[in-house]
Amino acid sequence: MSNRGLKLKSTYRPSSKLEVFYTGGASCISSKGLLACSCNDEVKLVDPISGSVTSTLAGDSEPVTALAFSHSGNRLYGASRSLQQRCWDTSNNAVLRSWKGHKGPVLALAVDPSGGLLASASADRSCRVWDTDGFYCTHAFHGHRGLVLEVIFHPKELMIITAGDDAEVRVWDLITKSCVATLKDHFSAVTSLSLSPDGWTLLTAGRDKVAILWDLRSHKKLATVPIFEAVEGAAIVPDDSAFKALVQSALGPSGKKSKALVFATGGEKGILKLWRADTGDCIYEQRHGIATGQGEMAAAGEEIREVHVLPNAEGLMITTGDCRLLFFSPEEEAEKHVVKLGRQLIGNLDEVTDLRLIGPPAAPTQLVLATNSPTIRMFDLTTMSCSATLSGHTDTVLVLDAIQTKESKTLLASGAKDNSVRVWDEAGECIAVGQGHVGAVSALAFSRRAFSFLVTGGADKLLKVWDVSKLLDGSSAEGAEVPRLRATAAVAAHDKDINALAVSPNDALICTASQDRTAKVWRLPDLVQMLTLKGHRRGVWSVQFSPVDQCVLTGSGDATIRLWALTDGSCLRTFEGHGASVLRASFISAGTQVVSAGADGLVKLWGVRTSECTATFDEHEGKVWALAVAGENDAVLATGGADARVNIWRDCTAEDEAAVVASRTQNAVKAQELSNALKDNDYQAAAAMAFELGHAGQLRSVVEAACAQGQEAAEGILNALVDGLEKDQIKQCLEFIREWNTNSRHCHAAQATLQAILSQHAPEVLLDIPGVAALLDGLSAYTQRHMARIDRLRRSVALLDYTLGAMRVVAPQEAASAQE
């Protein structure tokens, strides 16, 4: 196969990413639709549409416990376990104020509708109100006998409402600074407070499995609604919300006249429910997309922690125990109003163990992830939203592989620590299970040509071949029980765990990589050993066949990549450059290049012919366990690692080459314009052009030529040049001056330009330039040296003047001639 027309890759850049932005705890959403999420000791600002982190607000090394936006969204208030409270300006992420106001951690924050007051509920059994302009305490309320868990402001009156784990709800008057009512009908901690749009009906819900509605005018109970689960989040659905049609259809024809309130709840069962307040009926419940368990309790991590109404009442956002943010909105389906899961953002993926890109080969559309959990998640590459969750394994999923058949049918296989292998269709349904391993399944691969078999290996050191042909022709059994895969061959392949395996492009060979520091080549279908590849000094983590040549690629814990000949098992190439174990390596560019990922957090690009590293990409902070290549001409890479981050990389080689060509062309045109300006003695235009090109030598020549025209002309040219410079341009100009100033022949041009900068820009502007102090130190040292040299010259000239003056005692030539 000829590769003469093949272009080698030189640059990949991240086009999108999945990263940790929510680790559980506090979250809130602004009126502008911006999410704020606690992420360990930091606060992440997230765009809910794309799921991308827009800003990171640094913390104080302690977990964030509470967050609240001002109603305008211009300020964010936060509190941490260190007892510090902070106020950030969301326009520039600056900390406006930091203070301590409680003796215990703040558990909840609320801002009044005017934005002038901030309320903080604390574990020290108190609630305090703060002026947001002066950040001083205006009220301190005591009375709860336990932790104060929740606080809200009344939308129209000067009052706040607090709830605690003492099962009490208290109403406080901000004018009289007293408690005007104590609501005591709960029997356990009250976790949620919500007010009706008019502000006079209060919803309280707690861990006693009931929700209670109160009249805030009379402070009497209106209704008690049994929820039948411990409630962690509840919110009244506004009358003008997107749920209006759903609510009206549930209330019936008389619902509009009765003005019955509808509220949403979520709790330990992981089910979002909508309730009618006047009758206590559950009018809708949504399990799909939240909890996968079917019992009384949700699976671990699937319980609902918070329920928020989205801005403009467009829907609901809930947070779960496993750090997911789910966005629900009502839709009409078959003339019925239902609640649909619109977007699902994963705040913390945990450690990524493997990944695959699936969809059309030329442009993959979905990303499949295996993380440190029994579930497999599928993401839409356009929105980076989690589109599906595949459940079936009972322990951590370790490895994935996917194929697309000639009929454009996609199959996904997964192996896990539960000793099983599962095959999934493109809809996310498990269509087959293979059991027979007695250890974790850590390696698997589909056949590459016929798509008729699946090969697995794992901690039991066994290599197995499974028949999957029936899954392709659609003849698998249908019913409640998932069909079982049949093993057609098995062999004890290695002395230690099998870490990886690969199938050759023609389905004739299998290569296995093991912790025993060897890779072995096996013949199909009878699994006869053909070669043993020895040379690595540590366990082998990765293996892949070349798509064009008779060779195989391996990556090892000894930080090297080796290329082996399949004819005799000899080592053809050794790639060295990683600083730690090479965990994944793959051929790209039709076998002419290799891309690798290692435990050093680096992704490297290699040339096969030269064995040299041509590019290094650093976008991970931990081991890179997973690497996948897809797209037309291998244009898309995906990497994932121990830092819970996934990067989607796009090939930018053509763009960079086009940018270089365009830059060269533009520079050539500007260089010609510079030459023309010098010929026309247009020094001002020539200086501006030389500075724009970044040519320090040519700029110096222009300055020297301008200085030769006289002091007044030079000042005019230089003042016009530096007058409109931005801070970064001033810094560049000072760097040029520092370079010129090191040579006595060019110091006059340097000093003239420096004088122009000092005369045209105020000292405050210059001192605000990053790194200007070091530049000025360098200028000062050489300037003092030049000044001392000039001073010595002046003294020498003065001595010469004195000598010539003294020589005047000699008679002039005319007088001497007359005497003769």
Image (cartoon, rainbow, N blue to C red):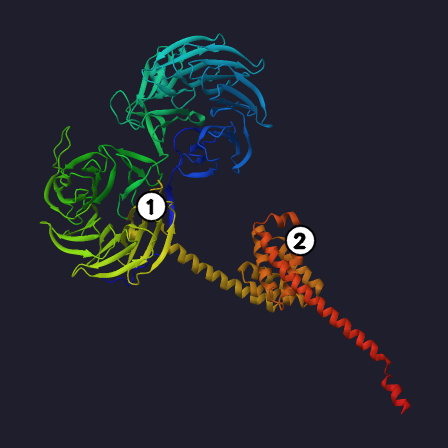
Give the residue type that dot 2 points to.
Gln
Q: Position of residue 691 (x, y in %)?
A: 57, 59
Q: Where the N terminus falls, by quadrant?
A: bottom left
Image coordinates of residue 82 in percent, x first then y, are: 48, 30
Residue drawn at 35 percent across, 32 percent down? 343
Q: Nearer the viewer, residue 233 or 556?
A: 556
Secondary element at tag 2 = helix
Question: Which residue is the site of mark 1?
Answer: 623
The count of marks equals 2
Q: Label 2 belongs to which residue?
A: 760
Residue 11 visible in the displayed image: no
Can the viewer see residue 750? yes
**Relative height, residue 703 to residue 254 (above, below):** below
Residue 437 shown left or right of residue 649 in the figure: left
Looking at this view, is 210 or 477 the one in front? 210
Between 69 and 283, the one lying in front of the other is 69
Specify the quadrant of the image occupied by residue 404: top left
Quadrant containing the C terminus is: bottom right
Packing grade of label 1 (10 A; few <14, some 14-19, many >=20) is many
Q: Identify the residue at the far bottom of this view.
A: 820
Image location of residue 132, percent across then percent down: 57, 27
Which three-letter amino acid code belongs to the residue tagged 1? Lys
Q: Say few, some or many: other residues with alpha carbon within 10 Å of mark 2 (under 14 / 14 to 19 / 20 or more).
A: some
SS at mark 1? loop
Quadrant in the rendering for residue 408: top left
Residue 712, by quadrant, is bottom right
